[in-house]
Image (cartoon, grey):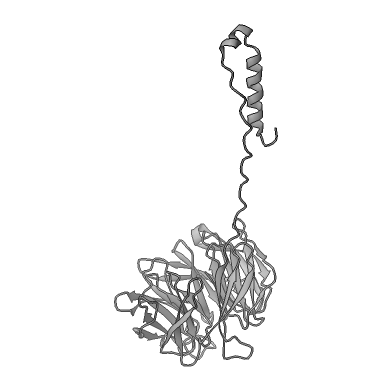
Amino acid sequence: MSGWSRRRFVGVAAGTAATASVPARAMAAVPVEPPAAPESPAPATPAPRPAAPRPLFLGTYTSVEGGGTGIGLATYDPVSGRVTGAGTLTGVGDPSFLAAHPDGRTLYAVNERQDGGVTAIRLGGEGERHRVLGTRGTGGAAPCHLSVHPSGRWLLSANYGSGSVAVHPIGASGALGERTDLVTHSSPAPGPGQQGPHAHQFATSPDGGHVLAVDLGTDTVYTYRLDTARGTLTEVSRARTRPGAGPRHLTFHPGGRYAYLANEVDNTVAVCGYSPATGRLTIGKAQSTGTGAGTSYPAQFAVTGDGRYAYLANRGDNSLTRYAVEADGARLRLIDTVPVAGDFPRHIALAPDGNLLFAANQRSGTVSVFRVDRASGQLRLAGEPFASPVAVCALPL
């Protein structure tokens, strides 16, 4: 019976018993077939192939002591979260924030310097080298954030030092053209303790109809309409936080009607309502970061793809706050905070499949990786943090 299934063995036994009950005369008239040969063993189910490593790009400062020499190159295992270094792309100065084109073929980096710039990098395929396509000036100082419009035709950047936002066209090759617009936040007046405007983020709403600029210095989120033919901006509304909040980063819920604002200066967060029709943002009341008294300099939110959980990076507290998202995105309920296993988490990002969360820890020069429990939102550290000099951005693709 070696190699036979139980179902096959039971069938043969039943057939033998039936033959034994036939009269002898009838048996002579019934042709007897030779017994069937035993079946070959069923092929074993092949073990699942290990998931292919995915690319991870790391932003840093190149002009500070102990900083990097360009954009850090690495890969990560999408199951275990293990990060493996793959060298450095040199020739890009102070690439403190990174963003990828929607087609995944081009990477963009800010050059966070007094004479600010944005650089395009063509990503090489298997066996090919990455190529720097060139740099364009942002028209402002110390750009700290950039994003690609969903159309793939425009690059949006925020100049922290000069409080302005810029637009650059993106060509078919991924290279950048000359700037098509630059808007400086000249009003309202700077908030308490601020000397001027400080644009900290410039990103597109989920519906693609508006672009929003978060300015820490003026305690304001500006909404613009982008002319997608000419690359020019028209302001349509403003939303003001409470004085001295210092808004830093806005992250939308996947439903597109709500967003979550991290306020760096007063250590709070806020749920914001958003109207796709008008672009108007309505900022709700201040809520706790879960880090207790004092300022923990909250950096930014990351929201799961299913919209059920949101995570906040707290730089001063070296922690990640977990919130449950309720009422279709209209409410955040604080659950807990977990140690980030590093110092000063400047940036966090979820892997595209949502199973891993990466935290770039600036002062410890490390990237922590957490497994995300999709049901509970719980975070579990996936091994030892990966060493990366002055890690200020982690972009998993």
> Dividing the picture into quarters, in which one does residue 117 lie?
bottom left
Q: Is residue 376 above or below residue 206?
A: above
Q: Position of residue 226 (x, y in %)?
A: 34, 75
Instruction: Please tell me which residue is depicted at 33% across the width and 79% down the height of the picture.
Output: 231
Q: Locate the N terminus by quadrant.
A: top right
> Dividing the picture into quarters, in which one does residue 88 lie?
bottom right
Looking at the image, which residue sits at the far bottom? 114
Q: Position of residue 134 (x, y in %)?
A: 42, 85
Can residue 80 be seen here? yes
Instruction: Please tell me which residue is depicted at 43% across the width and 89% down the height of the picture.
Output: 140
Can residue 201 be seen here? no
* Camera-side residue of 179 and 291: 179
Question: Relative to residue 293, is residue 325 drawn left or right?
Answer: left
> Dividing the picture into quarters, in which one does residue 101 lie?
bottom left
Q: Position of residue 142 (x, y in %)?
A: 49, 88
Question: Relative to residue 15, is residue 155 drawn left or right?
Answer: left
Q: Is residue 377 above or below residue 97?
A: above
* Camera-side residue of 148 and 276: 148
* Camera-side residue of 264 and 162: 162
Q: Position of residue 66 (x, y in %)?
A: 64, 88
Q: Is residue 77 above or below residue 170?
A: above
Looking at the image, which residue sits at the far left? 229
* Camera-side residue of 271 and 369: 369
Total numbered labels: 0
